[in-house]
Image (tube, rainbow, N blue to C red):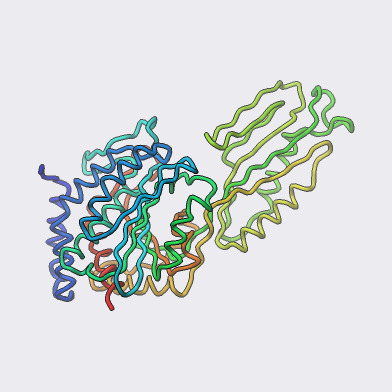
Protein backbone atom coordinates (compact mmCIF):
# COMPACT_ATOMS: atom_id res chain seq x y z
CA UNK A 1 0.00 0.00 0.00
CA UNK A 2 1.28 3.44 -0.91
CA UNK A 3 2.26 5.55 2.08
CA UNK A 4 0.08 8.52 2.97
CA UNK A 5 2.43 11.38 3.94
CA UNK A 6 -0.25 13.33 5.79
CA UNK A 7 -1.16 10.37 7.94
CA UNK A 8 2.44 9.41 8.58
CA UNK A 9 3.13 12.92 9.83
CA UNK A 10 0.00 12.77 11.95
CA UNK A 11 1.16 9.50 13.47
CA UNK A 12 4.58 11.01 14.23
CA UNK A 13 2.88 13.93 15.94
CA UNK A 14 0.75 11.49 17.92
CA UNK A 15 3.77 9.51 18.97
CA UNK A 16 5.61 12.60 20.19
CA UNK A 17 2.73 14.30 21.97
CA UNK A 18 0.81 11.39 23.49
CA UNK A 19 3.40 8.90 24.69
CA UNK A 20 3.58 10.56 28.07
CA UNK A 21 -0.12 9.89 28.57
CA UNK A 22 0.44 6.13 28.48
CA UNK A 23 1.38 6.20 32.14
CA UNK A 24 -2.12 7.43 33.07
CA UNK A 25 -3.94 4.79 31.02
CA UNK A 26 -4.78 1.28 32.11
CA UNK A 27 -3.31 -1.68 30.28
CA UNK A 28 -6.62 -2.20 28.47
CA UNK A 29 -6.73 1.43 27.39
CA UNK A 30 -3.15 1.31 26.13
CA UNK A 31 -3.98 -1.75 24.06
CA UNK A 32 -6.90 0.07 22.46
CA UNK A 33 -4.88 3.20 21.75
CA UNK A 34 -2.10 1.13 20.17
CA UNK A 35 -4.61 -0.65 17.92
CA UNK A 36 -6.10 2.66 16.79
CA UNK A 37 -2.68 4.12 16.02
CA UNK A 38 -1.61 1.06 14.04
CA UNK A 39 -4.68 1.23 11.81
CA UNK A 40 -4.45 4.84 10.64
CA UNK A 41 -3.05 4.17 7.18
CA UNK A 42 -5.87 1.71 6.49
CA UNK A 43 -8.35 4.24 7.84
CA UNK A 44 -7.02 6.88 5.46
CA UNK A 45 -7.35 4.53 2.52
CA UNK A 46 -10.92 3.66 3.48
CA UNK A 47 -11.85 7.32 3.77
CA UNK A 48 -10.51 8.06 0.31
CA UNK A 49 -12.38 5.09 -1.11
CA UNK A 50 -15.68 6.20 0.45
CA UNK A 51 -15.33 9.86 -0.53
CA UNK A 52 -14.62 8.95 -4.15
CA UNK A 53 -18.00 7.22 -4.39
CA UNK A 54 -20.72 9.71 -5.15
CA UNK A 55 -23.47 9.01 -2.64
CA UNK A 56 -25.70 12.03 -2.98
CA UNK A 57 -29.03 11.34 -1.33
CA UNK A 58 -30.79 11.15 -4.70
CA UNK A 59 -28.18 8.72 -6.05
CA UNK A 60 -29.41 5.44 -4.54
CA UNK A 61 -26.87 3.37 -6.46
CA UNK A 62 -24.04 5.35 -4.89
CA UNK A 63 -25.47 5.05 -1.40
CA UNK A 64 -25.75 1.29 -1.86
CA UNK A 65 -22.11 1.17 -3.04
CA UNK A 66 -21.02 2.82 0.21
CA UNK A 67 -23.07 0.30 2.16
CA UNK A 68 -21.52 -2.56 0.17
CA UNK A 69 -18.05 -1.44 1.26
CA UNK A 70 -18.98 -0.96 4.92
CA UNK A 71 -21.11 -4.04 5.44
CA UNK A 72 -18.35 -6.69 5.20
CA UNK A 73 -16.11 -4.65 7.47
CA UNK A 74 -18.75 -4.68 10.20
CA UNK A 75 -19.40 -8.37 9.58
CA UNK A 76 -15.69 -9.10 10.08
CA UNK A 77 -16.10 -7.59 13.55
CA UNK A 78 -18.86 -10.05 14.44
CA UNK A 79 -21.84 -7.88 13.55
CA UNK A 80 -24.90 -9.27 11.81
CA UNK A 81 -25.99 -6.81 9.14
CA UNK A 82 -29.16 -6.26 7.13
CA UNK A 83 -30.18 -3.80 4.46
CA UNK A 84 -33.49 -1.97 4.89
CA UNK A 85 -34.74 -0.91 1.43
CA UNK A 86 -36.56 2.41 1.17
CA UNK A 87 -37.87 2.38 -2.40
CA UNK A 88 -41.34 3.18 -1.04
CA UNK A 89 -40.12 6.70 -0.20
CA UNK A 90 -37.80 6.96 -3.23
CA UNK A 91 -34.59 6.59 -1.26
CA UNK A 92 -31.82 3.97 -1.26
CA UNK A 93 -32.28 2.49 2.20
CA UNK A 94 -30.48 2.02 5.51
CA UNK A 95 -27.76 -0.31 6.74
CA UNK A 96 -28.00 -1.70 10.25
CA UNK A 97 -25.50 -4.03 11.94
CA UNK A 98 -25.76 -5.50 15.43
CA UNK A 99 -23.93 -7.52 18.03
CA UNK A 100 -25.99 -9.09 20.80
CA UNK A 101 -24.55 -9.46 24.27
CA UNK A 102 -24.86 -8.15 27.78
CA UNK A 103 -24.59 -4.75 29.41
CA UNK A 104 -25.71 -1.39 28.12
CA UNK A 105 -27.36 -1.39 24.72
CA UNK A 106 -25.39 1.11 22.64
CA UNK A 107 -26.74 2.61 19.40
CA UNK A 108 -24.24 4.16 16.97
CA UNK A 109 -25.81 6.47 14.39
CA UNK A 110 -24.38 7.74 11.11
CA UNK A 111 -25.37 8.40 7.51
CA UNK A 112 -23.94 7.29 4.19
CA UNK A 113 -25.37 9.99 1.92
CA UNK A 114 -24.01 13.47 1.12
CA UNK A 115 -25.43 16.70 -0.28
CA UNK A 116 -23.30 16.35 -3.42
CA UNK A 117 -25.31 14.76 -6.22
CA UNK A 118 -23.76 13.31 -9.42
CA UNK A 119 -24.15 16.65 -11.22
CA UNK A 120 -22.06 18.50 -8.62
CA UNK A 121 -18.65 19.71 -9.84
CA UNK A 122 -17.19 18.63 -6.49
CA UNK A 123 -16.60 14.89 -6.73
CA UNK A 124 -13.14 13.75 -5.62
CA UNK A 125 -10.94 13.26 -2.57
CA UNK A 126 -7.88 15.50 -2.82
CA UNK A 127 -4.83 16.27 -0.69
CA UNK A 128 -3.07 19.50 -1.58
CA UNK A 129 -0.80 21.84 0.38
CA UNK A 130 -1.64 20.14 3.66
CA UNK A 131 -5.41 20.37 3.16
CA UNK A 132 -7.69 17.42 2.47
CA UNK A 133 -10.97 18.03 0.70
CA UNK A 134 -13.72 15.85 -0.66
CA UNK A 135 -17.51 15.63 -0.95
CA UNK A 136 -18.82 14.39 2.37
CA UNK A 137 -15.31 13.96 3.78
CA UNK A 138 -16.24 15.49 7.13
CA UNK A 139 -20.03 15.16 6.81
CA UNK A 140 -19.85 12.35 7.44
CA UNK A 141 -17.72 9.72 5.79
CA UNK A 142 -14.88 10.65 8.09
CA UNK A 143 -17.24 9.95 11.00
CA UNK A 144 -18.02 6.52 9.58
CA UNK A 145 -14.29 5.77 9.43
CA UNK A 146 -13.90 6.88 13.05
CA UNK A 147 -16.78 4.66 14.13
CA UNK A 148 -15.40 1.65 12.31
CA UNK A 149 -11.84 2.30 13.47
CA UNK A 150 -12.90 2.45 17.11
CA UNK A 151 -14.82 -0.82 16.81
CA UNK A 152 -11.85 -2.49 15.08
CA UNK A 153 -9.53 -1.48 17.92
CA UNK A 154 -11.92 -2.93 20.47
CA UNK A 155 -12.39 -6.13 18.50
CA UNK A 156 -8.67 -6.63 18.02
CA UNK A 157 -8.34 -6.79 21.80
CA UNK A 158 -11.52 -8.89 22.28
CA UNK A 159 -13.29 -6.01 24.01
CA UNK A 160 -16.28 -6.35 21.71
CA UNK A 161 -16.94 -9.83 23.06
CA UNK A 162 -20.41 -10.09 24.62
CA UNK A 163 -21.23 -6.43 23.98
CA UNK A 164 -24.61 -5.16 22.84
CA UNK A 165 -24.01 -2.65 20.05
CA UNK A 166 -26.20 -1.66 17.11
CA UNK A 167 -24.95 0.44 14.20
CA UNK A 168 -27.59 2.30 12.22
CA UNK A 169 -26.51 4.11 9.05
CA UNK A 170 -29.22 6.00 7.19
CA UNK A 171 -29.11 6.61 3.46
CA UNK A 172 -31.08 9.85 3.35
CA UNK A 173 -30.04 12.08 6.25
CA UNK A 174 -29.26 15.06 4.06
CA UNK A 175 -32.61 14.92 2.26
CA UNK A 176 -34.90 12.48 4.04
CA UNK A 177 -37.65 10.70 2.21
CA UNK A 178 -41.27 11.35 3.03
CA UNK A 179 -43.19 10.56 5.04
CA UNK A 180 -40.68 10.71 7.86
CA UNK A 181 -42.78 8.21 9.77
CA UNK A 182 -41.58 5.65 7.22
CA UNK A 183 -38.10 7.07 6.61
CA UNK A 184 -37.18 6.95 10.33
CA UNK A 185 -39.42 4.10 11.44
CA UNK A 186 -36.62 1.57 11.88
CA UNK A 187 -34.21 4.04 13.48
CA UNK A 188 -36.83 5.01 16.06
CA UNK A 189 -37.47 1.35 16.78
CA UNK A 190 -33.74 0.84 17.40
CA UNK A 191 -33.67 3.85 19.72
CA UNK A 192 -36.54 2.54 21.80
CA UNK A 193 -34.57 -0.59 22.75
CA UNK A 194 -31.26 1.19 23.44
CA UNK A 195 -29.71 2.67 26.58
CA UNK A 196 -27.37 5.18 24.93
CA UNK A 197 -27.24 6.69 21.44
CA UNK A 198 -24.02 8.12 19.99
CA UNK A 199 -24.11 10.08 16.75
CA UNK A 200 -21.09 10.58 14.51
CA UNK A 201 -21.86 13.98 13.05
CA UNK A 202 -18.86 16.29 12.87
CA UNK A 203 -16.90 17.42 15.88
CA UNK A 204 -17.23 21.07 16.84
CA UNK A 205 -15.30 23.58 18.88
CA UNK A 206 -16.33 26.44 21.12
CA UNK A 207 -13.73 29.10 21.80
CA UNK A 208 -11.00 26.87 20.38
CA UNK A 209 -11.90 23.90 22.59
CA UNK A 210 -13.69 20.70 21.64
CA UNK A 211 -17.37 20.62 22.56
CA UNK A 212 -20.17 18.07 22.39
CA UNK A 213 -23.89 18.38 21.75
CA UNK A 214 -26.41 17.05 24.24
CA UNK A 215 -29.19 19.28 22.87
CA UNK A 216 -30.01 20.46 19.38
CA UNK A 217 -32.68 22.38 17.56
CA UNK A 218 -35.47 21.08 15.38
CA UNK A 219 -35.74 21.66 11.63
CA UNK A 220 -39.15 22.06 10.04
CA UNK A 221 -40.22 23.36 6.64
CA UNK A 222 -43.22 25.53 5.92
CA UNK A 223 -44.92 26.51 2.66
CA UNK A 224 -46.90 29.75 2.59
CA UNK A 225 -49.36 30.40 -0.26
CA UNK A 226 -51.19 33.67 -0.82
CA UNK A 227 -53.87 34.38 -3.41
CA UNK A 228 -55.48 37.48 -4.85
CA UNK A 229 -57.83 38.58 -7.61
CA UNK A 230 -56.13 38.83 -10.97
CA UNK A 231 -56.96 42.04 -12.84
CA UNK A 232 -55.37 44.92 -14.68
CA UNK A 233 -52.83 46.71 -12.51
CA UNK A 234 -54.80 49.96 -12.74
CA UNK A 235 -57.33 48.44 -10.39
CA UNK A 236 -54.92 47.39 -7.65
CA UNK A 237 -56.01 48.45 -4.12
CA UNK A 238 -59.55 49.10 -5.30
CA UNK A 239 -62.47 47.58 -3.46
CA UNK A 240 -63.29 45.29 -6.36
CA UNK A 241 -59.74 44.02 -6.91
CA UNK A 242 -57.85 44.31 -3.64
CA UNK A 243 -54.12 44.24 -3.00
CA UNK A 244 -53.02 41.10 -4.82
CA UNK A 245 -51.11 38.01 -3.74
CA UNK A 246 -47.62 39.51 -3.61
CA UNK A 247 -48.55 42.38 -1.30
CA UNK A 248 -50.28 39.88 0.97
CA UNK A 249 -47.13 37.74 0.94
CA UNK A 250 -45.00 40.79 1.74
CA UNK A 251 -47.27 41.74 4.63
CA UNK A 252 -47.04 38.31 6.19
CA UNK A 253 -43.28 37.94 5.82
CA UNK A 254 -42.68 41.43 7.22
CA UNK A 255 -44.75 40.63 10.28
CA UNK A 256 -42.95 37.30 10.69
CA UNK A 257 -39.72 39.27 10.77
CA UNK A 258 -41.06 41.74 13.32
CA UNK A 259 -43.11 39.54 15.65
CA UNK A 260 -41.73 36.01 15.86
CA UNK A 261 -38.51 36.71 17.76
CA UNK A 262 -37.81 34.19 20.52
CA UNK A 263 -34.50 33.02 22.07
CA UNK A 264 -32.97 30.22 20.00
CA UNK A 265 -35.58 30.49 17.25
CA UNK A 266 -34.79 31.09 13.58
CA UNK A 267 -37.20 31.25 10.65
CA UNK A 268 -35.73 31.62 7.21
CA UNK A 269 -37.38 32.27 3.84
CA UNK A 270 -35.42 30.25 1.30
CA UNK A 271 -37.53 30.52 -1.85
CA UNK A 272 -40.23 32.94 -2.99
CA UNK A 273 -42.20 33.33 -6.22
CA UNK A 274 -45.28 35.23 -7.40
CA UNK A 275 -47.30 36.13 -10.48
CA UNK A 276 -50.38 35.21 -12.44
CA UNK A 277 -49.15 31.63 -12.04
CA UNK A 278 -46.68 30.63 -9.32
CA UNK A 279 -45.63 27.19 -8.18
CA UNK A 280 -43.14 25.52 -5.87
CA UNK A 281 -42.05 21.97 -6.81
CA UNK A 282 -41.14 20.20 -3.57
CA UNK A 283 -39.57 17.24 -5.37
CA UNK A 284 -36.90 19.41 -6.99
CA UNK A 285 -36.98 22.42 -4.62
CA UNK A 286 -37.50 24.76 -7.58
CA UNK A 287 -39.98 27.55 -8.29
CA UNK A 288 -41.62 28.80 -11.48
CA UNK A 289 -43.83 31.78 -12.30
CA UNK A 290 -45.44 33.64 -15.17
CA UNK A 291 -47.33 36.89 -15.52
CA UNK A 292 -47.03 40.52 -16.53
CA UNK A 293 -45.98 43.64 -14.69
CA UNK A 294 -49.33 45.26 -15.48
CA UNK A 295 -51.41 42.45 -13.98
CA UNK A 296 -52.32 42.10 -10.30
CA UNK A 297 -50.76 38.77 -9.24
CA UNK A 298 -53.10 35.93 -8.44
CA UNK A 299 -50.70 33.72 -6.49
CA UNK A 300 -47.48 33.82 -4.51
CA UNK A 301 -45.59 31.14 -2.63
CA UNK A 302 -42.78 31.25 -0.10
CA UNK A 303 -40.91 28.29 1.31
CA UNK A 304 -38.81 28.44 4.44
CA UNK A 305 -37.53 26.56 7.42
CA UNK A 306 -37.93 27.01 11.15
CA UNK A 307 -35.62 25.81 13.90
CA UNK A 308 -36.69 25.65 17.52
CA UNK A 309 -35.06 24.67 20.79
CA UNK A 310 -38.12 22.83 22.12
CA UNK A 311 -41.32 21.32 20.75
CA UNK A 312 -43.26 23.79 22.89
CA UNK A 313 -41.50 26.69 21.15
CA UNK A 314 -42.37 25.17 17.78
CA UNK A 315 -46.06 24.94 18.64
CA UNK A 316 -46.07 28.45 20.09
CA UNK A 317 -44.46 29.86 16.95
CA UNK A 318 -46.91 28.02 14.73
CA UNK A 319 -49.79 29.68 16.58
CA UNK A 320 -48.22 33.13 16.11
CA UNK A 321 -47.72 32.51 12.40
CA UNK A 322 -51.31 31.38 11.92
CA UNK A 323 -52.61 34.49 13.71
CA UNK A 324 -50.51 36.78 11.49
CA UNK A 325 -51.66 34.99 8.35
CA UNK A 326 -55.34 35.35 9.23
CA UNK A 327 -55.21 39.17 9.16
CA UNK A 328 -55.65 39.44 5.36
CA UNK A 329 -55.24 42.44 3.13
CA UNK A 330 -58.34 43.35 1.06
CA UNK A 331 -59.17 40.85 -1.67
CA UNK A 332 -56.59 38.27 -0.58
CA UNK A 333 -56.32 35.00 1.28
CA UNK A 334 -53.46 32.90 2.63
CA UNK A 335 -52.67 29.51 4.04
CA UNK A 336 -49.58 27.85 5.47
CA UNK A 337 -48.60 24.19 5.51
CA UNK A 338 -46.15 22.89 8.11
CA UNK A 339 -44.32 19.82 6.86
CA UNK A 340 -42.89 16.96 8.91
CA UNK A 341 -39.36 17.66 10.06
CA UNK A 342 -36.64 16.87 12.54
CA UNK A 343 -37.79 17.29 16.15
CA UNK A 344 -35.78 19.17 18.71
CA UNK A 345 -33.49 17.32 21.11
CA UNK A 346 -33.78 18.81 24.61
CA UNK A 347 -31.05 18.47 27.19
CA UNK A 348 -31.78 15.64 29.64
CA UNK A 349 -30.19 14.12 32.72
CA UNK A 350 -29.25 11.07 30.68
CA UNK A 351 -27.54 13.21 28.04
CA UNK A 352 -25.58 15.04 30.73
CA UNK A 353 -24.44 11.73 32.18
CA UNK A 354 -23.17 10.59 28.77
CA UNK A 355 -21.14 13.79 28.48
CA UNK A 356 -19.76 13.26 31.99
CA UNK A 357 -18.57 9.78 31.00
CA UNK A 358 -17.05 11.13 27.79
CA UNK A 359 -15.14 13.73 29.77
CA UNK A 360 -13.71 11.01 32.01
CA UNK A 361 -12.22 9.54 28.85
CA UNK A 362 -10.99 12.98 27.77
CA UNK A 363 -9.19 13.38 31.10
CA UNK A 364 -7.54 9.98 30.65
CA UNK A 365 -6.31 11.04 27.21
CA UNK A 366 -5.29 14.55 28.23
CA UNK A 367 -7.78 16.00 25.78
CA UNK A 368 -10.19 18.93 26.10
CA UNK A 369 -12.92 18.70 28.68
CA UNK A 370 -15.91 19.11 26.40
CA UNK A 371 -18.55 21.64 27.36
CA UNK A 372 -22.07 21.28 25.97
CA UNK A 373 -22.50 23.25 22.76
CA UNK A 374 -25.22 25.87 22.48
CA UNK A 375 -28.00 23.97 20.65
CA UNK A 376 -28.53 26.90 18.29
CA UNK A 377 -25.09 26.13 16.82
CA UNK A 378 -25.86 22.51 15.95
CA UNK A 379 -28.05 21.66 12.98
CA UNK A 380 -30.73 19.02 13.00
CA UNK A 381 -29.81 15.36 12.65
CA UNK A 382 -31.04 11.80 12.88
CA UNK A 383 -30.21 11.59 16.58
CA UNK A 384 -33.21 13.80 17.33
CA UNK A 385 -35.58 11.03 16.29
CA UNK A 386 -34.35 8.68 19.03
CA UNK A 387 -33.55 11.30 21.70
CA UNK A 388 -37.04 11.11 23.27
CA UNK A 389 -36.39 7.46 24.12
CA UNK A 390 -32.70 7.19 24.97
CA UNK A 391 -29.80 9.18 26.44
CA UNK A 392 -28.07 10.82 23.48
CA UNK A 393 -24.93 12.68 22.46
CA UNK A 394 -23.49 13.88 19.15
CA UNK A 395 -20.31 15.40 17.77
CA UNK A 396 -18.16 12.26 17.76
CA UNK A 397 -17.27 12.46 14.08
CA UNK A 398 -14.62 14.26 12.07
CA UNK A 399 -13.42 17.81 12.46
CA UNK A 400 -13.51 19.84 9.29
CA UNK A 401 -14.76 22.98 7.60
CA UNK A 402 -17.08 24.08 4.82
CA UNK A 403 -19.54 21.20 5.05
CA UNK A 404 -22.28 21.14 2.38
CA UNK A 405 -20.26 23.30 0.00
CA UNK A 406 -17.65 22.61 -2.69
CA UNK A 407 -14.25 22.53 -1.03
CA UNK A 408 -15.52 20.78 2.13
CA UNK A 409 -12.41 19.84 4.09
CA UNK A 410 -11.51 17.39 6.81
CA UNK A 411 -8.81 17.87 9.45
CA UNK A 412 -6.98 14.60 8.91
CA UNK A 413 -4.65 15.25 11.83
CA UNK A 414 -7.67 15.00 14.15
CA UNK A 415 -8.83 11.61 12.89
CA UNK A 416 -6.48 9.46 15.04
CA UNK A 417 -7.22 11.25 18.33
CA UNK A 418 -10.95 11.34 17.66
CA UNK A 419 -10.85 7.60 16.96
CA UNK A 420 -8.96 7.00 20.21
CA UNK A 421 -11.50 9.12 22.08
CA UNK A 422 -14.42 7.15 20.64
CA UNK A 423 -12.75 3.77 21.15
CA UNK A 424 -12.09 4.41 24.84
CA UNK A 425 -15.56 5.88 25.23
CA UNK A 426 -17.17 2.76 23.78
CA UNK A 427 -14.93 0.62 25.97
CA UNK A 428 -16.12 2.53 29.03
CA UNK A 429 -19.79 2.39 28.08
CA UNK A 430 -19.74 -1.35 27.41
CA UNK A 431 -17.93 -2.44 30.56
CA UNK A 432 -20.08 -4.20 33.23
Taking the spot 23% from the left edge, 67% from the top edge, the residue there is 160
**Where is residue 202 drawn, in percent x and y?**
36, 54
Residue 291, above or below 108? above
Left or right: 224, with 376 as reference point: right
Q: Position of residue 228 (x, y in %)?
A: 78, 33
Residue located at (64% from left, 31% from top): 279
Between residues 426 and 178, which one lies in front from this camera angle?
Answer: 178
Give 310 or 53, whichever is nearer the viewer.
53
Measured as percent of width and height from the top left, residue 256 is found at 67, 49
Q: Quadrant of the C terminus?
A: bottom left
The x, y position of residue 46, in whole percent, is 22, 47
**Which residue is painted at 48% across and 71% down in the image?**
348
Depth order, front residue of 14/189: 189
Can you name the residue that lies furthest to the bottom here?
Answer: 432
**Residue at the right extreme of this rendering:** 239
Horizontal side of residue 53 vs 119, given as left or right? left
Q: In this image, 403 relative to 266: left or right?
A: left
- Position of the N terminus, as image quadrant, is top left
Say left or right for 227 vs 26.
right
To which quarter of the image does residue 109 belong?
bottom left
Q: Nearer the viewer, residue 174 or 86?
A: 86
Amino acid sequence: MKSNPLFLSALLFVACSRLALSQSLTADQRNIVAAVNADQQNAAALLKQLVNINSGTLNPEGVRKVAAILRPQFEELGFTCRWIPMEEIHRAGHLTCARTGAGRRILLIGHMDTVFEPDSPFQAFEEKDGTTTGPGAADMKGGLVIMLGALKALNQNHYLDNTNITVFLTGDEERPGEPLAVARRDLIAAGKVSDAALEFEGGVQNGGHDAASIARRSAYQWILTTTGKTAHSSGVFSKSVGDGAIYEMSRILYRFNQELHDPGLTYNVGLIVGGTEANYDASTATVSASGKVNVVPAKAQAVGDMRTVTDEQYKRTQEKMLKIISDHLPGTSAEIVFKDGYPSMPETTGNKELLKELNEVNRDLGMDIMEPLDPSRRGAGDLSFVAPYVASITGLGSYGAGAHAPGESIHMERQPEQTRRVALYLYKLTRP
